[in-house]
Amino acid sequence: MNLTNKKISIIGAKRSGIGAAKLVKQLGGIPFVSDSTSDEKMNHFIQQLENENIQYELGVHSERVFDAELFVVSPGVPSDAKVILDAKKKGIEVLSEVELAFNFCAGTIISITGTNGKTTTTAFLGHVLNECGLKSFVAGNIGLAFSEIVLDVKKDDYVSLETSSFQLDYIKNFRAKISMILNITIDHLDRYDNKFENYVASKYRIFENQTDSDALIINDDNEALCNYEIKTKAPIKKFSFTKKLANGVFVESNFAIYFENGIEKFRFNLNDLFIRGEHNWQNAMAVIIAAKLLGVNNEKLTKALCSFRGVEHRLELVKEIDGVKYINDSKATNIDSVIYALKSFDNPIILILGGKDKGNDYSQINDLILSKVKKIYALGSSREKIFKFFHKTMKVEIKETLKECVDAASKEARSGDIVLLSPACASWDQYENFEQRGNEFKKIVETLF
C-alpha cells in the first residue's frame, strides 16, 4: 500500500485514530482527522494532533472528509454511522485502523479476539514470548494502537494483537499467522442489529484470510464456536476442560496438557498460575498452544506462565484495608465478565454494578449474585434497570457517582468482605473508557484511610 501524497480521512480522534493519523503522515500521506465529539475529553488527543501538525475537525463530519481516497475508521465508530454510509455511496474505500497497520507489519502477528479474555490473553502471550526470548509487541485494542508500533516491528519480531469485532468489521487483507477466538457470548448487539449471528460473523472474520500455513485456536467448550460452522483453510487447534484432544490443550487433574497428533508435548499445573479463576485457566491454555506453535522451550514456557501477574483493571487488587479487599474489575463490561469475577471469590461481596447497558440480561447472574453478594450499589445510566431487577431479593442502593459507591461500601464492609467494581456495563455514560473508570476507582480507594 503506497500512501504517498494520498488524502486519507480518519474517522475518530481517539487512540486508534491518532495512531492511524501519525502512521499516514510518517508514510507520506495527508491525514485529516474528523470526530463528531467536541467535549473536554478530547483535549489530550487534540494536543497530539496539533503537536504533529495534523489537520482535524471536531463536533461534525463536514464535507471535507469526503475529499479523500480512503477512510480509516476507528473501532468506536458504528458501521451504520451516516459518515461511513455516505463514504461508501461515494465509492470511498473504508478500512479499519488494524487493516491499515497490517499492510506495514514486517513481523509475525498473533491476533486474539473473543467476547471476554482478550486483554488478559493478549498481555499474557506478549509476556510469555518476551520472557522466552521472542521479542513481542503488545498492541491493538489494548494499550497502544497497532498503527503506533507497527513501524518498529522487525522481521523476527512478534505482535500480540488484541482484535475486537469492531476492528474486524473493516478488514480486507488482514491475516494473522496465529488467530485465536477465546469465546463468543452475547455482547454488543446494539452494534449488530440485535442479531447474535451478525456478531459471530464479525468475530469469524479473524480467520477469513488465513491459509494452511497458519493456525486457528478456538475454545471447544464455547457454545457459539461449536454451533456456528467454521470454514477455514487454517489447521484448527482447540482447548477444552471437558474433552481430551489429540491436537490442542485439555485439563486433567488441574494440569493443562498439550498434545500434537496424539502425543503429549507439554504439561503445566494450572494451580501454579498467579492469576486466579477458571477463565484465566482458559486464557493460559490458549497461550500455551500459541507458544508451542511458535516453538517455545518447555522449561522457559513454564517459568513464563508462572511469572505473569495479570493486567490492570481485570480483577486487580487495589488495596486491603482493615481486612477488606478492594478489587478493580472495570474491564468487566458484560455479564459473562461479572460471572467470571464472582466465581473467583468465596468471600462476601459488595458489588458496584452499572454504566452504559448494552442489552444485559441480569437473570443470567441472578443466582450467582444471590449466593455471593451481600449488597449492590448501582450507578450510571443503567442504575434504574439494575435496581428494578434486584431490589426485591436483595439490598440495592442507587448512587450517582463512583465515589459515593466506594465511600458507602467502605462504611458497610466488614473484615473478610470484598468491595468489587465489576460493572457489567460499558463506561461511556460517565467515562471516556473503562481504564479511566478503573483509575478513578483506584484513586478513591487510596484516599479512604
Image (cartoon, rainbow, N blue to C red):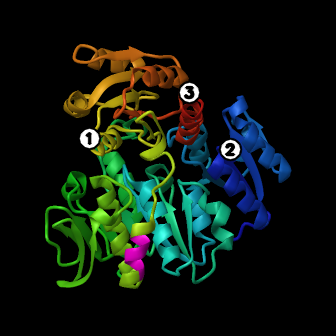
Q: Position of residue 137 (x, y in %)?
A: 57, 69
Q: Quadrant of residue 338?
A: top left
Query: Can the viewer see residue 64 in this picture?
Result: no
> Residue 449 vs residue 330: left or right?
right
The correct choice, above or below, for 234 with respect to 65 in the image is below
Give yes or no for contact between labels 2 and 3 (Cβ–Cβ under 8 Å): no
- Nearer mark to the viewer, of 2 and 3: 3
What's the amino acid at mark 2?
Answer: Ala
User: Between 135 and 88, which is closer to the camera in this rendering?
Assistant: 135
Query: Can the viewer see residue 159 in this picture?
Result: yes
What's the amino acid at mark 3?
Answer: Gln
Chain-order first, disc 2 or disc 3: 2
Chain-order first, disc 2 or disc 1: 2
Which portion, as a residue range, is magenta?
Answer: 300-305
Chain-order first, disc 3 or disc 1: 1
The correct choice, above or below, for 58 with respect to 262 in the image is above
Spatial separation of the CA atoms under disc 2 and disc 1: 42 Å
Spatial separation of the CA atoms under disc 3 and disc 1: 30 Å
Which residue corresponds to mark 2? 13
Q: Position of residue 196 (x, y in %)?
A: 30, 43
Which residue corresponds to mark 3? 430
Which residue corresponds to mark 1? 346
Q: Position of residue 230 (x, y in %)?
A: 26, 64
Kindly state the secondary structure of the residue where label 2 is placed: loop
Q: Please give the name of the residue rendered at 32% of the width and 75% of the height, measured from the top-left corner.
A: 233
